[in-house]
Amino acid sequence: MLPLKARLDLRSAQEKMTSGLFSKLGDGTVLAVDVAELPIDPARAYEVGQRIAASVNRARLSGYLLSVLPREIYKRCCAFLPNHSRHYVILPEFPGSAEGYNGLLDQARTRLGTDCVTLVRGGERRADGAFLVETRDGEQHRLGAPGLGPDGEPIEGPIFLADDVAPQRGDVRHPDAVFVHKAQTVSRLSAKVPAANGICLNYPTGIVDPAHELLLEARDTLRDSSLSPEAPVFDAAMMADAELAYSYLEQAEMNATGLALTVRKQINGKSFNNSEITMWDVGSLILGLLAAVELELAPADRIYRRIKKIMASLPVIQDGDAAYPPTLINVRDASIERRGFDACDFARLTSAVTRAAQHTALADASSQLMGKWQIAGLMQGGVLNNILKTRIQSSYLSHCAHYQTRVLPALGQSETRSPYREAFAGETVADRTVNLLYTVDKIGILPTEPLLLEYVELGPSAECAVLTDVFLGAMKHHFDQTGQLLAPSETPIDTAPWFVYQGFDLGHETRWNVSYRKGREVVFEPVASSPYGIFSTKAAYLWYAVRPCRHTRKMLDMAQEHARIDGFGMSSGLFLDGYAQMKNHADLNTNGIVLQALAHLKRRTR
């Protein structure tokens, strides 16, 4: 997981590891290796490591990941990586002159037999067991058990006190070992430990890691006053937005089923509508209607009758012992357009139906619908599977999987797995956050939903709260750096390719990307420069509803100023290039979620 300029497949690249292979890598490049691909035999692993080390321009290899790896694979890694040990010599005080300092440094290097020596002062041992030392330039370093401190700052190590280390102790063969010498004078230093015999940069090598960088960046950005929590506001303008969003649900309604057109587009007075609906959009429709009840946009009885009609119209596929709603149906008659099963969309529908069940008037209809579903046969190892045209596919490695674990217990599936929950492990919040960010990157682009929908519908889990902090901090950081206001989410658009996915993308060189299909090809482009970069209307409303502050209010103001289509609904979004509206283009999911966000916001102001 790194924004690498080149990703290496060890199996195919071992024989090609020449200086030419690495010649195009720029300064600050990190070499990351999938540890699972290393030979199990330590001797063979070391051979591979030496080949890479000999090929890389050493001045450009500024670091590698190790501290975040599980301890049980340290030995394998250490055999692979060349020794990168450093020696810190703690002195009472630094020499007063540069000449004296350089002379003392040369003596230390000669005495220890290595150039990897840093003269420091201090040596205070902190509560976490790390040593705090300071260089002549005033730079502070923490030395100890490698990894992240409770505040997210890196700790270099592992640390070995030189007086306690025997020359050939096996546990010091660690590529990032730090040897600490406490000495009144350099003449008393004893070279009792192995010298660094590989890459030596002669200065501490920090963790060059985007997840760690993002953690520190978000922590600093979240201190900005524009992100300080403010009391939420629900005013007349927001009520007008709710009325406009609800008008979409009314105008798009199909009398026979209660369902709604999922996309509406008007050009020169002619309408172009999408009459196919996923279970995700059915869920957004029901949740939007429930929000309309809460906002008192129409008589509750009328809305309840429509929701009952929707529930009664939904088809169920009988597949052996399993029974489930199809992937795609027609809104006009609820006929099946595409067979199959989408676990993520089903979770959204389930969330909607379980919330509807809390309304007395809908309790029986909700119970009857959920009683038709039999998904136990679709569960495998705690994961709900997707059913595609030709195969079964696990839904585990998706950003919906965690949302599913919050929803599926309502259907009796309490032993469900979440990649977020399983990654959110470690002794400190910093450790847990970095591990979670690795998993987020492995899954792919992280959009606003279902992350913030969990907040609105279920209340935030610990994992959701952490990711929301990081996401918000990253959006604000992007704004500070570029002046571009983001509100990323997946959304339909009014031109080919018609639908785009966009959001936070830790694993690419650019942090915010848009993804779409071009024929069979999946294209990734930076949101900032892509013609399909979109400011999502629903994302703007969700962010203000969940995290009201000056910055999210700025996002909301942008949507209120540019996304309203009077008499039609809220536009799906704005093109980031100039924040021009998608003219006369609105969709069900956007308007349903805008209603959800506004109802949540009004609820918070009571």
Image (tube, grey):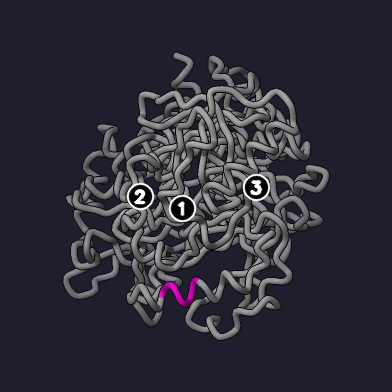
Q: Residue at x 58, y 19 (%)?
A: 228
State if disc 3 and disc 2 touch (CB < 8 Å): no
Q: Is residue 324 left or right of residue 244?
A: left
Magenta residues, start to end: 45-49
Is the C terminus in the top left, top right, bottom left or bottom right quadrant? top left
Q: Which mark is residue 44?
A: none
Rounded to the nearest angstrom, the CA distance separating label 2 from label 3 is: 33 Å
Helix, strand, or loop for circle 3? Answer: loop
Q: Look at the image and tell me whether residue 529 can be seen.
A: yes
Mark nearer the viewer, 1 or 3: 1
Label whose residue precedes the other's in the sequence (2 or 3): 2
Q: Is residue 293 left or right of residue 115?
A: left
Give percent across and percent down for residue 110.
58, 49
Give percent across and percent down for residue 155.
46, 38
* Residue indicated by mark 1: 438
Residue type beneath disc 3: Ser
* Residue 463 falls within the magenta-colored stretch: no
Q: Residue at x 73, y 49 (%)?
A: 584
Q: Which mark is residue 423?
A: 2
Q: Look at the image and tell me whether residue 598 can be seen.
A: no
State whether residue 217 is above or below residue 403: above
User: Which residue is more in the foreground, 296 or 347?
Assistant: 347
